[in-house]
Image: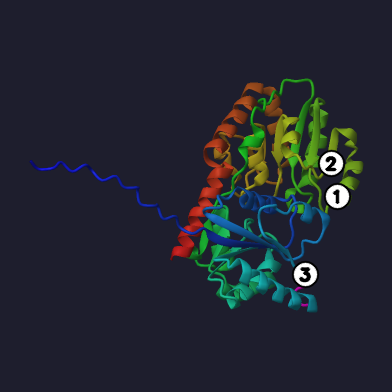
Amino acid sequence: MSAVLAPRLTSPAPVSMPNPVRVCFMIDRLSRAGTESQLLALIRAFDRSQVQPSLVLLDGEDDLSRALEPADCPVIRLGVRKLLSPRAMVAAQRLRAFWREQRPDVLQTYFLDAAYFGAPLAKLCGIEKVLRVRNNLGYWLTRRHRVLGRMMRPFVDATLTNTNEGKESLVAGDGIRANRVVVLENGVDTARFRRFMLPDTSKKMIRVGCVANLRAVKNIDGLMRAAQVALAKFPQLVFEVAGDGEQRDELTQLHAELGLNDRFVLRGSVADVPAFLRSVDVAVLPSHSEGMSNAILEYMAAGRAIIATDVGANARLLEDGKCGVLVPPGDSAALVDAIGELLANPLRAAGLGAAARRRVNAEFSREAMCKRFESFYRDLVSR
């Protein structure tokens, strides 16, 4: 009789997990502005089995920057405020030692000084892939900036931007080849905006809110002038701006000249943006120029009724008016008319807020953003 052999039980072969990509991020300092906030969000949300981050701060010695440093990420502060200085030479040696310890596969730089300082040094230190990030449309660039940008190209493998408009600007305005520009869209932490009530513009008092740094490109002075007209037509309105910046003194003077009093409030820097937006019925963004606006993403996640200028990626985010109202940049009359339209149609205001929330949850969540970057890094280092 032949023996029946029992099947041999074996443990499954272990799955070989790829090593995480080591990415070093470099920026001047940390703040609550849009670019810095997106960078911190990436660092904190990365799956550490996919991406191991480290962070270089060119300066970073101020209290706010120190307070914002991520806890679970190696950080070095170089204390450099002038690139052409003895301190910068010493900092370069410290940075080389930091990189020898962290062994990054990729350096990703933000803003000009970090790129000028970091990119050539990274190549000298053997970091294989160097990236630059430019998420605006280059409205501020001078001829000198463009010349220095061309000098940087041999040290940079790719430039990252967050909109197709940004890519077009880099190709047409800066002469960068299209295949060296990569579009990676932003995302927002939608969990912070859960259970927000939809806007109701039929109330006795309607709050119009704006989240923006006080810089000329954000056109807060234009919003003030539009508010003066709107308040005469719609006395139930109150305007509030969350943000601070270099224009504060100028805007404070204009506020007094226009006689806006407590109907237009400059709140200053606001740490809890979701709490601010919870108190707002209509959210506006009057900017002259934008890339992919973090403020718009937050407005959408909060389900606010949105009015934004038709610049940068605003039309894409708001689906050409399906998720908010678009107005021409610099057109105060159109902004006032848009506010009046939402006040007269509370159901439309609520519908726009609901559509915006659905869209941001589907396409622009923080999780979706991280997966875009993780996939990009994995592809980059495998080439």
**Relative to 163, residue 274 above or below:** above
Quarter the C terminus occupies? bottom left
**Relative to 248, residue 296 above or below:** above
Q: Quadrant of residue 279?
A: top right
Label 3, label 2: how far apart the Cα atoms are: 32 Å
Name the disc covering residue 248, or none.
1
Query: Residues at badges 1 and 2 in contact (C-beta under 8 Å)?
Result: yes
| Picture residue at 81% right of the left edge, 48% below the top | 244
What range is drawn magenta here?
80-85
| Picture residue at 83% right of the left edge, 40% below the top | 267
Q: Nearer the viewer, residue 356 or 223?
A: 356
| Picture residue at 53% right of the left edge, 71% below the top | 128
Q: Amino acid at mark 3?
A: Val
Disc 1 versus disc 3: nearer the observer: 3
Which residue in the protein does label 3 denote?
80
Q: Amino acid at mark 2?
A: Leu
Name the disc covering residue 285, or none.
none
Q: Position of residue 327 (x, y in %)?
A: 65, 40
Query: Residues at badges 3 and 2 in contact (C-beta under 8 Å)?
Result: no
Label 1, label 2: how far apart the Cα atoms are: 9 Å
Q: Amino acid at mark 1?
A: Arg
Q: Position of residue 202 (x, y in %)?
A: 72, 20
Which residue in the protein does label 2 denote?
266
Q: Residues within 10 Å of mark 1 (few under 14, many from 20)?
A: some
